[in-house]
Image (cartoon, rainbow, N blue to C red):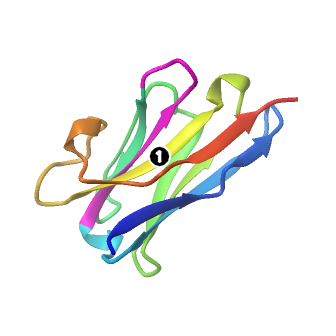
C-alpha cells in the first residue's frame, strides 16, 4: 500500500513552535520532491514550502518565509517542517505531498503532486 503520512500536529500557544514530519509507506521519499500545504477553515489550500529530492533547493510561500523551515533526511526518508513564531492565523490542517523528481521541479502548485497525506491538525490558541 502506497501512502504518505503527516505527524507532529497539535495545540500550541501563540509564539510557540511545532515540527511536522512527513513519512511514506510503499515507497521512499528520497526520490521525490515534497511539499507542505495547509488549509484553514473556510479557506483554499495554500502552498507552504517545498524541497527537492536532494534537499538542495527549497521554496517557500509568503506565509512561511522567515518563520518556517523545510528540511529532509534521506537516510531516514523523512521530510520535516519546522514552524516557529506561530500565530492564530496558522491554525489549519497541514498536508504533506510528494511528486517524482522527474516530473517537476520544486513547486507549490498542488495540482502537480501525486501523493497526499490525510493531514495533521495544527491549532494555535492561547
Identify the residue shown where x is 42% and y is 29%.
Answer: 45
**Rendered-image quadrant of the C terminus:** top right
Instruction: Give x and y (percent) for residue 25.
Output: 39, 75
In-image side of 89 versus 43 (left or right): right
Q: Position of residue 20 (x, y in %)?
A: 59, 54
Identity of the residue drawn at 72% across and 36% down? 123
In terms of secondary structure, what is the magenta stretch mainly? Answer: strand
Residue 109: where, in percent of width, then height? 26, 35
Side (left or right) of 11 relative to 110: right
For residue 114, above or below residue 76: above
On screen, residue 7 versus residue 72, left or right, reads: right
- Residue 85 visible at all: no
In which image quadrant can residue 28 be found? bottom left
- The single residue placed furthest to the left in the displayed view is 102
Q: Which residue is mark 1?
A: 95
Identify the residue at image location x=64%, y=54%. Answer: 19
Q: Quadrant of residue 12?
A: top right
Q: Extreme front residue here?
A: 1
Q: Is residue 88 magenta?
A: no
What residue is at 49 percent from the left and 19 percent from the top?
Answer: 43
**Quarter assignment of residue 54:** bottom left
In which quadrant will I find the N terminus?
bottom left
Residue 38 is a magenta residue: yes
The span shown in magenta is 32-44
Amino acid at each position: 500500500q502506497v501512502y504518505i503520512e503527516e505527524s507532529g500536529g497539535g495545540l500550541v500557544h501563540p509564539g510557540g513552535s511545532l515540527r511536522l514530519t512527513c513519512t511514506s509507506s510503499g515507497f521512499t521519499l528520497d526520490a521525490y520532491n515534497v511539499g507542505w500545504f495547509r488549509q484553514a477553515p473556510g479557506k483554499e489550500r495554500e502552498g507552504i514550502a517545498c524541497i527537492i529530492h536532494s534537499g538542495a533547493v527549497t521554496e517557500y510561500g509568503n506565509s512561511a518565509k522567515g518563520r518556517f523551515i523545510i528540511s529532509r533526511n534521506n537516510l531516514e526518508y523523512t521530510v520535516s517542517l519546522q514552524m516557529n513564531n506561530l500565530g492564530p492565523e496558522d491554525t489549519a490542517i497541514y498536508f504533506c505531498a510528494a511528486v517524482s523528481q522527474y516530473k517537476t521541479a520544486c513547486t507549490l502548485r498542488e495540482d502537480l503532486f501525486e501523493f497526499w497525506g490525510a493531514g495533521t491538525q495544527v491549532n494555535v490558541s492561547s
